[in-house]
Amino acid sequence: MRYDLENSKCCSVDFTEEEHHHGDEHDHDHGSGEGWKPYLPGAISFVLLVSGLLLKYIFKAAFFESWFELLWFGLAYIPVALPVLGEALESLRKGEVFTEFFLMGVATIGAFAIGQYPEGVAVMLFYAVGELFQNAAIRRSKSNIEALLDVRPKLASVFRKDTYQIVDPYEVSIGEKIQVKVGEKVPLDSVLLSEKASYNTAAITGESKPMSSSLGEDVLAGSINLDGVVELEVSKLFNDSSAAKILDLVQNATSRKSKTELLIRRLAKIYTPIVVYLAIAICFLPYFVVEDYVFQTWLYRALIFLVISCPCALVISIPLGYFGGLGAASKNGLLFKGANYLDQLTKMTTLVMDKTGTVTKGIFEIQKIVVVGQRTENDFMKGLASLEAMSNHPIAKAILEHPIEGGLFEVDEVSEIAGKGLRGKVDDQWLLAGNARLMEQFEIAFPSEIEKILDTIVLVAIDGEFAGYVTIADALKEDAKAFVDALKKVGIKELVMLSGDKDSITQKVAKSLGIENAKGGLLPEDKLQEVEALQKNGKFVAFIGDGINDAPVLAASDVGIAMGAMGSDVAIETADLIIQTDEPSKVLTGLKIAKSTQAIIWQNIYLAFGVKIAVLLLGAFGMATMWEAVFADVGVAFLAILNAVRLQRMRW
């Protein structure tokens, strides 16, 4: 239970991609004949210790004394002590004196030096057993996160030279056609070429219900094909796929330490040398003040003090607690990019949210088409669809789903004007498509009554003349209202909605959800200013959004939360917490997990400090033996580890 977790060979809670590549082999070994080997040294020591105690105290064997007793307990000590003493020497070689290995080595060798052989063996044995318990707890805590790593497909069936060839997904290029059979994982983010397909996306999104896709729709890497052989066209390289990004997030999550964890590590580096010097003082200072000073008695007390002082319960259970929280979150479709963000989320006082794609489905349908001039509705929509095909915005997708006759026009010189719309050359005509601010920027006159329309509206101008508009409606997500109500119940009183959509639509949606503070018609920089203003007033702000235009706010907020399924790549890269299912109510799940994690960690801190201080005082005054010391060190570590593992069993 080494306190330097980052350098430990046996109890680190970080893991790397290389570890994952060899994970299957490692698991196989432990499932075969080698699975018992880690337990063999402890088993040998335990049998020798118990049999030695029986011979000495129960049977009172005459031969079991002097050099034979030392030999017996020495043989019991060696199997569990050698690895620890080896680590202590290695640490000394590196200039690290005050490690837990050093403390254990000094305390147990000292116990042998004063004839307390069984106690010396017991301390080292329980320490070794603690290592095994701790490693088992870490493996359990990793299990939910490592399950996510299994979403990464290892092979791809790609169409080359008139046949399908099995290759590494890294070797597949954008635009290539791949085939996925029933039960196989989709190797790369793709677009469906078959008429329809059904997928299990639980490993990616945490959603157990199968997802259906139709011709031309996106399919995420890691999804499992449930129905027939399907063909897809690769849309992203393997390194850019959803599965690869999840993998990267998972692997780096535990490297971002919480403030509590970092504080405990700093304290351990100060605390350990202090207790060593105190132990020396306990051993020698009484010589000057105690009349009947006996060196062996005070040395024994100093050794007890050393054993008790080991900080393993603190420095192991705390990162293990955070790791358990990250695992529980992953199991529920939430990806925290670091343990520190678990702490950050509990501080949230104000939640600011985007509208489209966050609390609304972001699935728009055209409600009304109004054409000005001599153009037919088909020509009008054909030109608009040609330009919107250059965008991945939900409104653009709704326009593209509207049926038109004939293919799309050629489009050149397309530019996106943030928060306003698109401009491009369509069939040799300049076409503008966006909101009223876009029309005003290019001095396009349009009817004033358009401002009174509440639905989302796309205004269109062709070659400097207003050509008509399209109204589009969105719907609230099923859990949006319950989400807002629940936030208020858990104490998040200040809820704010900021949207780039028309203010009238934003106010309408906000009112239906019970959000009093809402502003619409905002550019990305406007949203940023609003969030910064809240922060200047002392609010701890979390922001939840999904679009490219939300990225600046996600970065500036105290906790950035992005929708992982529909959200843009930029938003996902910028956010601190990813909601894989796109359900806003998952924020509440994340908050519960974060608060439970924090509670368990502080319980462990109070437990470890309370017991250690009590037994340290008893040991210093000769009222505790080495057995109490063992409980104060390893026993408390056991309890703290079991407490941390509870996170994996909780239902959220």
Image: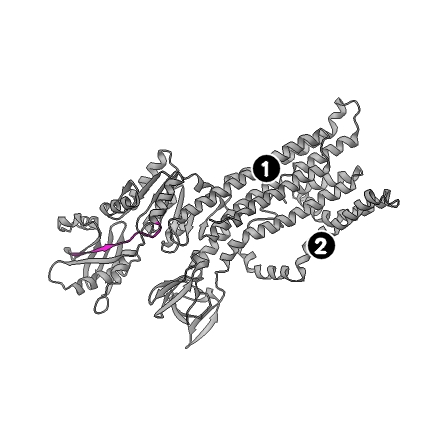
Q: Residues within 10 Å of mark 1 (few under 14, many from 20)?
A: some
Q: Residue at x 81, y 42 (%)?
A: 57
Query: Quarter of the image holding residue 613?
Result: top right
Query: Quarter of the image holding residue 104?
Result: top right
Where residue 120 appears, as percent x and y from the top left, is: 75, 41
Where residue 425 appears, as percent x and y from the top left, is: 21, 60
Where residue 33 appears, as percent x and y from the top left, is: 67, 62
Say which residue label 2 marks: 40
> Which sits earlier in the primary sequence, circle 1 or circle 2?
2
> Does any portion of residue 235 appear in the rendered image?
no
Tag 1: residue type? Answer: Leu
Q: Residue at the far right: name it.
A: 62
Task: Specify whether 477 is left or right of 399.
Answer: right
Q: Nearer the viewer, residue 72 or 270?
A: 72
Secondary structure under the numbered disc 2 in the rendered image? helix
Q: Residue at the far left: name it.
A: 374
Q: Residue 607 shows which numbered tag?
A: 1
Magenta range is: 468-479
Q: Nearer the viewer, residue 483 or 231?
A: 483
Q: Is residue 587 above or below residue 229?
A: above
**In which quadrant is the N terminus drawn?**
top right
Asked whether residue 568 is drawn in magenta, I would say no
Task: Specify whether 41 is left or right of 329.
Answer: right
Q: Residue at x 37, y 40 (%)?
A: 488
Tag 2: residue type? Answer: Leu
Where residue 207 appears, as percent x and y from the top left, is: 42, 57
